[in-house]
Image (tube, helix red, strand yellow):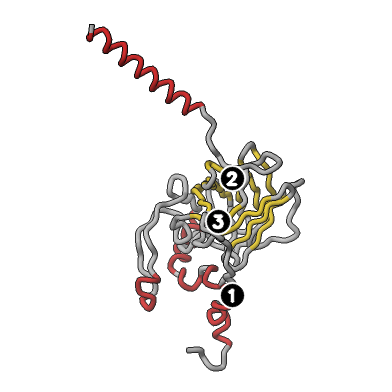
Amino acid sequence: MRTRVFPIVAAAVALGFLLHVSSVAQAPANRGPRTVDGKPDLNGIWQALNKANWDIETHGPSPGPSTLGAIGSMPPGMGVVEGDTLPYLPAAAAKKKENFANRWTADPELKCYLPGVPRATYMPYPFQILQGSNSVMIAYEYAGTVRTINMGKPREAPVDSWMGWSNGHWEGDTLVVDVTSFNDQTWLDRAGNFHSEALHVVERYTLVSANVLQYEATIEDPKVFSRPWRMNMPLYRHLEKNMQLMEYKCAEFAEDLLYGHLRKQPSK
């Protein structure tokens, strides 16, 4: 009798487990709240928790200027680039190497210049998304940077700029942003990865849960890279009570670096 009951019980347990797995797999994912027009609600303060601002490729620790000691060193980090290698053209690869050698004086971040896209997303500072039906505004803590994404009929930029020109639309539950009309004055990280004024970025923001936003950026620049490439990373919603962006207008801290050579008396 026992030899007959055990297979039946075992089969029932196995069937129950399979039905449970099937129901879980078929259940819709909880992707967070939606706006009144049915779109995923991206409103909130977000931040990347990676080391991409130091180097978007996988990297180990390295020293900074000796006068800064440990606080100037680069921490190790996993890359955010698919394939973990940037497809530089030969001349551009030489320029990147030169940028890296001069990074402690040449990185635009040192001078508090606007960071550009996609770098603004993964700098070590939070940013806030303010979502409307006709436009989406992104306010970045770094340098008081503000960016508006046009969600209406695509428009052309009046002039090239640091943050480019953003036209957006929805593809299902993904916010897709087409960014063009950049200048060539921003870097992609502190390691000297760079682009030209021909940069074209397509961003994708997908809410995968209530507090996690998957970010993807496809980079195309035929003057610098031999083919388009992509980076991706999760962004996390800040949940602290009364969380808000603080004011960080860093230009005042870069005055001596930019204009110190014009002083009659060197600053101490």
Question: Can you give x and y, in whole percent of width and height, for residue 145 in the image?
Answer: 62, 64
Q: Residues within 10 Å of mark 1 (few under 14, many from 20)?
A: some
Of 119 and 137, nearer the camera is 137
Point 57% across, 56% down: residue: 45
Q: Would you say the residues marked 1 and 3 are in contact, meaning their CB atoms lie under 8 Å apart?
A: no
Point 64% across, 42% down: residue: 34
Q: Would you say the residues marked 3 and 2 are in contact, meaning their CB atoms lie under 8 Å apart?
A: no
* Residue with the mark numbered 1: 251
Q: Residues within 10 Å of mark 2 (few under 14, many from 20)?
A: many
Residue 136 visible, this orientation: yes
Q: State the SS at label 2.
A: strand
Q: Quick check: 119 above or below 154?
A: below
Q: State the SS at label 1.
A: helix
Question: Can you give x and y, in whole percent of width and height, for residue 182 in the image?
Answer: 64, 58
| Total labels drawn | 3
Q: Which mark is residue 69?
A: none
What's the CA distance linking mark 1 and mark 3?
A: 19 Å
Tell me which numbered mark, 1 or 3, is placed earlier along the sequence. 3
Q: Would you say the residues marked 1 and 2 are in contact, meaning their CB atoms lie under 8 Å apart?
A: no
Q: Which mark is residue 121?
A: 3
* Residue with the mark numbered 2: 204
Of 222 and 167, nearer the camera is 167
What's the CA distance linking mark 3 and mark 2?
A: 12 Å
Point 38% across, 22% down: residue: 17
Quadrant of the image occupied by residue 191: bottom left
Q: Amino acid at mark 3?
A: Thr
Q: Amino acid at mark 2?
A: Arg
Quadrant of the image occupied by residue 70: bottom left
Residue 229 visible, this orientation: no
Tell me which numbered mark, 1 or 2, is placed earlier along the sequence. 2
